[in-house]
Image: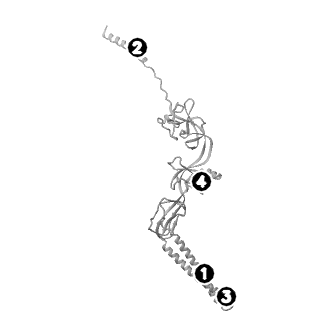
Amino acid sequence: MSVCSMKNSCFIALTALTISCLPLTGCAKKVEKPKGRPPALVITAPATVQNIPVMIKAIGNMEASEVVAIRSQISGQLTSVAFREGQEVAKGALLFQLDARSYQAELKKAEASLARNQTIMKNATKDYERYSQLVKDGIVTQEQAEGYRTKAESAAADVAADKASVENARTQLSFCTITSPISGRLGALVTDRGNVIKANDTVLVTINKLAPINASFTINDKELAALKSQMAAGKVSVSAEVPGTTGLKEKGVITFVDNSIDAATGMIRIKASFDNSKKLLWPGQFVNLSLTMAVLNNAVVVPSQAIQTGQNGQFVFVVTKENSAEIRPVSTGPASQGVTVITKGLQAAEQVVIDGQMRVVPGGKVETKQPEKAAASTPTASPGKTGAAGK
């Protein structure tokens, strides 16, 4: 056999051996089936039926019901301060005392002038009465009697002027004692004892009346009709809560509605009055206000965190009996105390996803976990963020 024939025979044998081994290699590996998507871990809550108040929410600024800036009506030296800064005072309480000596002297001078002119008037009156009788007896003429009548009338005018001077001097003397015109809380003292103050110049101290106290706020002109309707039916109650003091609320009523709407903002100013007996509210403080307009009876509600917003509007994820997630478009109403009214798209007792929406696939399987277990591992989907339906 030639060398060429041997080479061809070896090549053919090697090729056959290789081909015969290929099916054996392919049979050694098994084909794996694709794995399915695992169920999304979520927390659910049922839709319930509740009576929900329809409320107007606003941020208000507190204002004292009365504010008085104390000034001196006369000039003089401040001899006494009868209070402490920040003190509560009653109406009529002594606040300041000014040096009264010069005003006392003016009063005595006016009283002395009055006494002198009263004596002159009495004598002039007696002379006129005597001469009037002599005229009747024919002893003196009528012209002589008229002269004494003029003197008596002039003396009476002097007495009237002196009485006015005495009253003015007494009033000026009374201004040396400054008392509180209202009950309220005193502010900071502007000047100290011993300083000379000018009449109607410097504010010595400011008094704010805190009980009752007012809240000033604005509402949208679209909400005005509902407010006016409630006011026509009776007093409209308002609840005020100071930020950071959960559970501490003050109740009040609407007392004022402005007579015009701001054309630039479309807002109208409202005032409410609060008794503020516990002094929780303070002038200049910002508070959260709630006005109850009506009550929706037997409304279907879900926790507010269940509401999601997509490209086609608001929706919720509803968990079916087969533990799959269904996208349900909904129409919402007012929200109160962590729940939102569903006016369309959901029925009571249906289970909605309140946590884990970001991992839910529409139509996909879900696995419900207890809130205690899921709190540490499951991130909460914030209301208003776009979920899977919004993609």
User: Looking at the image, is mark 4 or mark 3 earlier in the sequence?
Assistant: 3
User: Looking at the image, is mark 1 or mark 3 earlier in the sequence?
Assistant: 3
Q: Amino acid at mark 3?
A: Gln
Residue 187's mark?
none
Residue 20's mark?
2
Dot 2 crowding, Cα within 10 Å, few <14, some 14–19, many 20+: few
Dot 1 crowding, Cα within 10 Å, few <14, some 14–19, many 20+: some
Distance of mark 1 from mark 2, alpha carbons?
152 Å
Residue 133's mark?
3
Distance of mark 3 from mark 2, alpha carbons?
171 Å
Whether residue 6 is situated above or below residue 267 in the rendered picture: above
Whether residue 138 is situated above or below residue 204 in the rendered picture: below
Residue 254's mark?
4
Confirm or deny contact between disc 4 and disc 1 (CB under 8 A).
no
Residue name at image x 65 percent, y 85 percent: 129
Confirm or deny contact between disc 3 and disc 2 (CB under 8 A).
no
Q: Amino acid at mark 4?
A: Ile
Distance of mark 1 from mark 3, alpha carbons?
21 Å
Q: Which residue is mark 1?
A: 156
Distance of mark 4 from mark 2, alpha carbons?
97 Å
Say which element carries label 1.
helix
Of the residues tagged 1 and 2, which is closer to the observer? 1
Q: Residue furthest left?
A: 3
Residue 10 spot, x, y in % from top left = 34, 12
Say which element carries label 4.
strand
Residue name at image x 66 percent, y 87 percent: 132
Residue 130 spot, x, y in % from top left = 64, 87
Of the residues tagged 3 and 2, which is closer to the observer? 3
Residue closer to the observer: 387 or 366: 366
